[in-house]
Amino acid sequence: MTLKLGVIGCGAIGREHIRRCSKVLQGAEVIAVSDINAQGARDVVNSLGLNAEIYADGMDVINAPQVDAILVTSWDPTHEAFTLAAVAAGKYVFCEKPLAMSAEGCRRIVDAEMTQGKRLVQVGFMRPYDSGYQALKKVIDRGDIGELLMLHCAHRNQSVAENYTTDMAITNTLIHELDVLRWLTDDDYKTVQVVYPRTTTKSHSGLKDPQIVLFETQKGIRIDVEIFVNCSYGYDIQCEVVGEDGIARLPEPSSIQLRKEARLANTILTDWKDRFIDAYDVELQAFINDVKADRLTGPSAWDGFAASVAADACLRAQQSAAIEPVSMPPRPSFYGN
Amino acid sequence: MTLKLGVIGCGAIGREHIRRCSKVLQGAEVIAVSDINAQGARDVVNSLGLNAEIYADGMDVINAPQVDAILVTSWDPTHEAFTLAAVAAGKYVFCEKPLAMSAEGCRRIVDAEMTQGKRLVQVGFMRPYDSGYQALKKVIDRGDIGELLMLHCAHRNQSVAENYTTDMAITNTLIHELDVLRWLTDDDYKTVQVVYPRTTTKSHSGLKDPQIVLFETQKGIRIDVEIFVNCSYGYDIQCEVVGEDGIARLPEPSSIQLRKEARLANTILTDWKDRFIDAYDVELQAFINDVKADRLTGPSAWDGFAASVAADACLRAQQSAAIEPVSMPPRPSFYGN
Amino acid sequence: MTLKLGVIGCGAIGREHIRRCSKVLQGAEVIAVSDINAQGARDVVNSLGLNAEIYADGMDVINAPQVDAILVTSWDPTHEAFTLAAVAAGKYVFCEKPLAMSAEGCRRIVDAEMTQGKRLVQVGFMRPYDSGYQALKKVIDRGDIGELLMLHCAHRNQSVAENYTTDMAITNTLIHELDVLRWLTDDDYKTVQVVYPRTTTKSHSGLKDPQIVLFETQKGIRIDVEIFVNCSYGYDIQCEVVGEDGIARLPEPSSIQLRKEARLANTILTDWKDRFIDAYDVELQAFINDVKADRLTGPSAWDGFAASVAADACLRAQQSAAIEPVSMPPRPSFYGN
Amino acid sequence: MTLKLGVIGCGAIGREHIRRCSKVLQGAEVIAVSDINAQGARDVVNSLGLNAEIYADGMDVINAPQVDAILVTSWDPTHEAFTLAAVAAGKYVFCEKPLAMSAEGCRRIVDAEMTQGKRLVQVGFMRPYDSGYQALKKVIDRGDIGELLMLHCAHRNQSVAENYTTDMAITNTLIHELDVLRWLTDDDYKTVQVVYPRTTTKSHSGLKDPQIVLFETQKGIRIDVEIFVNCSYGYDIQCEVVGEDGIARLPEPSSIQLRKEARLANTILTDWKDRFIDAYDVELQAFINDVKADRLTGPSAWDGFAASVAADACLRAQQSAAIEPVSMPPRPSFYGN
């Protein structure tokens, strides 16, 4: 039985997800699309040779009776409304991050979903679907390194554009760590502090880069995350987990070891798109399979809400130079123990 | 347009390929199967919930008009006949290794295919579809290490069963290297020599293990391959390519780096099935895509023939302790330059 | 010309230094020793077969006219007095850490040395003499990674005895980092903060372990040091230096790479004495050579004072949970730019 | 008690050894030197500020009654005569490789030493004193990898001068492996074969480079050594030892790991002098200590003879393209079991 998908938003990420569902993954078909720019939607459908209806309004995609599930890949400020509409229609919905423009918006989706009585929403956090993070999670959960005490992490980009601002280090960059580290540790943030090393001369004026974000979790785990978006040498994601019995480290992406020109070297990626490309496939295939099994298991609306609450605290900590509380309400039993 | 597949042989590998084509890959559907054991075929169809017709005779699968392409995963001695029948029927056929029980049998398939006038046969050598070997090939082809001079390779299994004999080091184990090293070097073997180190006490009587196989290629490249099937520590495939400008090495499989118990360690695989599991998916997806594009690009009948000729020379070299010639006829232009 | 050394204190470290100067290094001879326990001194002299006079009082060693230079390896609380006496006598003196029991004590030595008009004191910080740190320093000073922005460090012991208390994480353990990181960065600490992850269950009650110490330097470099003295897996010193152009990491100690029992592993040291054993030789040989060249270049009294001031701030930060200033006066020109 | 050394030959290596014994090592003093070029000897003595007598003839150095032990670092063809003279004089002698210009010459030294009744000769093979090889030997001897079955080795130089000829791959380059591999395996060579890969275009005409030398030992261990003296990327010594229970590999020289310009890289040495520089110190210190203990433990005259016999067989194998026997007589009990 093929899952019939409707996709709202045919920009870069929307187009990629449509291609993925149509050409790479199993068990789904894109039968309805919409975009604010109707011609853009037509171009995607034609270039991929799809047999999909084009709608002027995303709400019509949601309400089309033949559509089983929804992908929301539209302009960020429209995510909340489309997701709420899908929930109201009782349809499964995969919403790209951010789930909403504020923690309050995320909370409205959580409340709507709980009212509706069933998990319907998956947020587009793809890192838990990366094979490296999955292997790390397995080592942790198997107890190989004992109880967790500390995590040392880094998120480095080669460079960013002039329009990247200091707060985007949280909302665009750290947001991925905020989700994946909750998942790795099975824990919630309690406090956060931001410190600023001296800024690299490779940063543009107005951007403080690098930054270090320091968390304490509810269980007392300490996490430090270096965010360095003009590191100049490559795109590099590091995660070292220190437990009572040992230390586990996220693998470097696989590459050919070369002896050449007086160096023993492996290539470091420079384009972030190469780093998690497989994870996007795994993420959407999992969504398709879960919807067909009528039971979501991926990042939930609650996870989206938690990341948003943590991000808000980080933004306050960027300004205050103080240790800021992360005020998460207790997790409803609806979202599991 | 979905490719309609017929599968001959529902044993372990057949069942895996049927699952792959039905549940993992895109663009194909298994609509016909057969097995010498009819109940086995029914079990596979039922357990996977397929909508596939079960035939008593593989020849009927080949001749079923609704079947577009054939997978031959039956008992080894039947490969040649089924592949020849598929070629005669003008249908694309993916035949698991070995293509035939002898170089002569492979040659008959080559001749049939050339007579038929079009490449129709792909042999099930999956290593060229492994991401590590693909990265290595890219480094070589891009000229990063210059002209190739030597390859140092190893194929190690943790242990083998009592029924594994000395010649199987060639026919079952080295056969994969025979194919992938031709592909990596874009070259053919000229001579081969086998030397026997002292045998590990972990081998059973009657099995000489390890063995070292030494090749010279047409271009003068020297290749040494250690075959060690009771190495006791894991399943380990090594390939180091020495060029004029540098040396490239096949990556170790990705794994979590662990600091624990006074060791900085990565896990080594122990089950060969884990090592190339992704390569099988990529291999069959490539076959499906190529058939739909009406143009095969994977390991050809000629490649199967070449591996078989080389294996025969290796078997002679195992016996003679001499340097044996590998007598390959020149490659017909039909199979590319 | 052989340098005539007098050694005050024949305990574990004293004995090792006497052996080193007598049996391993070039250009020096131990001709006078003393210990609070006269028999201990005699045992050392006899077991090493030295031709050295034994004095009851360390002050007599200092004042013996045939003694050229002094090693102070006595009980910590006596370091200051012996060092001051050596300076007063105008003799070069190598004093094991700590230089004195307080920053004020260190300052008195600095003042005495400046009054005396010549650098006479070297403090026993051996890390700058470790080949790994030296290679790291060279990479930094050559500009290979550009201006420094952040350092991520860790100091891990397998376990510590019951008498190890929370403050000893600073005074006994971090003290080495306090010195070597000033040297690496050519910078001074400005502020310090201590945070406590949840304590490992392998720690004894009363010891908070691990701890994380966070520094800001005068230049704005941010340094985080994990101190984890019951890490259980080994003795492990890590130092990663993040610069504008790249990242350099202290090498792991050299060890045999082993493929065995499904692991690709290198041994991690468990005894701290093995880690810097070569550095002690290099350190003392440098002291001997420098004294003979009449010009000290190693860790100075000022460096000892700086480490002590920083340690005091760390101890305050352990208690206050606040960001504490590190109040270093400007470096006198006497100690170089 | 200081060992009084006489050094015959003040060229590059002689000068280095004189500096070592005078300025770096413990327990010895160079009190007599000679060189065919008297001015060269004077220059060395003056520039190092030694208190050493200069002799016109090396034989006079040997016979000077105040000289305890001899270092032979003269022109290769004179090694045998000086070593024989030292043995005749009953003095310990360290002779740089080659011990003699032929296996017969080495044998004459062995016979003289046995007649004299005591081990007096150490040959200047320094690799057994390298910390990496020592660690590898310890792993082997401790039984960590079980009985040895195979060794895969490589000796690579960045480039060689025009006067380097094909046979020098054996006599100048492989000679080190010939010694160290006997020591590692505690075994003797039985046969040898040389194969030639296609020659790198970076080699000059007349030099076949690379070469592969294949040994079988008395115990049946198989060893392959790649000699590649124009490898272009660096000076690189590799040694992988395959045992029944696991595989051990010689460590890479320690270096800073750098993340820079899209590469995760360690430096590879380019100058061979840097690779074993510490080993020379350890080697000569061991000789000094052993002489003082009146009991040599390093590479013996028999080891020099064995390397020479093996080298002769390699030279024959370079010419014959056949498997050549290595005809070693049994080891006399004089040289241990």
Image (tube, coloured by chain):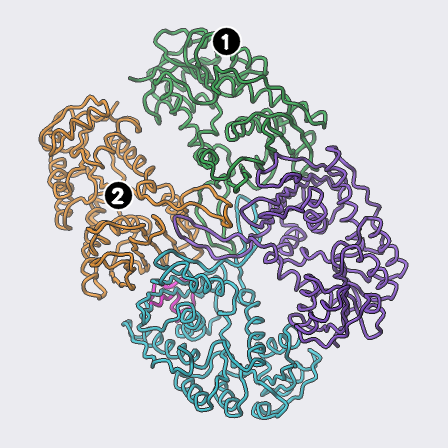
Chain colours: A purple, B cyan, C green, D orange
Instruction: Indicate the chain on which mark 1 is placed.
Output: C
- Return the residue found at the far right: A115
Q: Quadrant of residue B40?
A: bottom right
In the image, is residue D105 above or below residue B230? Answer: above
Q: What residue lies at 23% left-to-right and 43% top-to-bottom?
A: D300
Q: Residue D295: say if magenta.
A: no
Number of other residues with Cα within 10 Å of mark 1, as a class: few under 14, some 14 to 19, many 20 or more? some
Label 1 belongs to which residue?
A: C112
Q: Which residues are magenta?
A: B196-214
Query: Which amino acid, mark 1?
Result: Ala
Q: Position of residue A135 (x, y in %)?
A: 62, 56
For this rendering, which residue is in front, B59 or D201?
Answer: D201
Q: Main secondary structure of the magenta part?
A: loop
Label 2 belongs to which residue?
A: D125
Q: What residue lies at 53% left-to-right and 92% top-to-bottom?
A: B89
Q: What residue lies at 25% left-to-right and 62% top-to-bottom?
A: D193
Numbered disc 2: secondary structure: loop
Q: Position of residue C229 (x, y in %)?
A: 60, 34
User: Is D156 placed left or right of D86 in the picture?
Assistant: right
User: Is B60 placed left or right of D318 in the picture?
Assistant: right
Q: Measure the C-alpha gap from mark 2 to mark 1.
A: 52 Å
